[in-house]
Amino acid sequence: VNGQITMHYLLDHVLQLTKRNVVTLRNMISVEWLLVSGLGLSLVAMELQGPAVMKRTLWSMALRGVLTLAAARFIRTISFLITVLPSQNPQCYFGHFKYPPPTEW
């Protein structure tokens, strides 16, 4: 309850945000956005340390990250296609699932 009172005071009186503005901000922030922002900030921070500390450039690290994400997406797509798509054999469905479905589970 104390945290709720503190946040209400901070958002309402200090920042002067309406409830609609707070909901809009909450809807804009997502886990994916936070992860990508954190990754980007860490890459920029590593680049700002100077070339003496890093042997790779920001662009080569970003390219490696993009290629890794593309490879992961490709593997996920292939594994989905292998496991989820139904067989072309018409008897496959009826062999696994009885028709009509049972009335008692």
Image (cartoon, grey):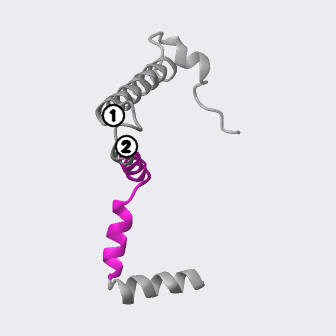
Q: Secondary structure at mark 2?
A: helix
Q: Give the percent coordinates (x, y) of residue 60.
A: 32, 29
Q: Give the percent coordinates (x, y) of residue 65.
A: 38, 32
Tell me if residue 66 comes above or below residue 90 in the rendering.
below
Magenta stretch: give its range. Answer: 17-43
Contact? badges 1 and 2 (CB < 8 Å): yes
Q: Which of the numbered marks, if any, corresponds to residue 62?
A: 1
At x 52%, y 86%, the residue is 5
- Which residue does the numbered mark 2 point to in the structure image? 43
At x 40%, y 55%, the residue is 30
Q: Give the percent coordinates (x, y) of residue 64.
A: 37, 27
At x 43%, y 84%, the residue is 10
Q: Residues within 10 Å of mark 2 (few under 14, many from 20)?
A: some
At x 33%, y 34%, the residue is 62
- Is 41 in front, or is 69? 41
Tell me if residue 53 comes above or below residue 45 in the rendering.
above
| Amino acid at pointer 1 | Ala
Tell me if residue 68 comes above or below residue 104 in the rendering.
above
Give the spatial CA distance, label 1 vs label 2.
Answer: 8 Å
| Amino acid at pointer 2 | Leu
Q: Secondary structure at mark 1?
A: helix
> In the orientation shown, which residue stands out farthest toward the front?
52
> In the orientation shown, which residue stands out farthest toward the right?
104
Q: Main secondary structure of the magenta part?
A: helix
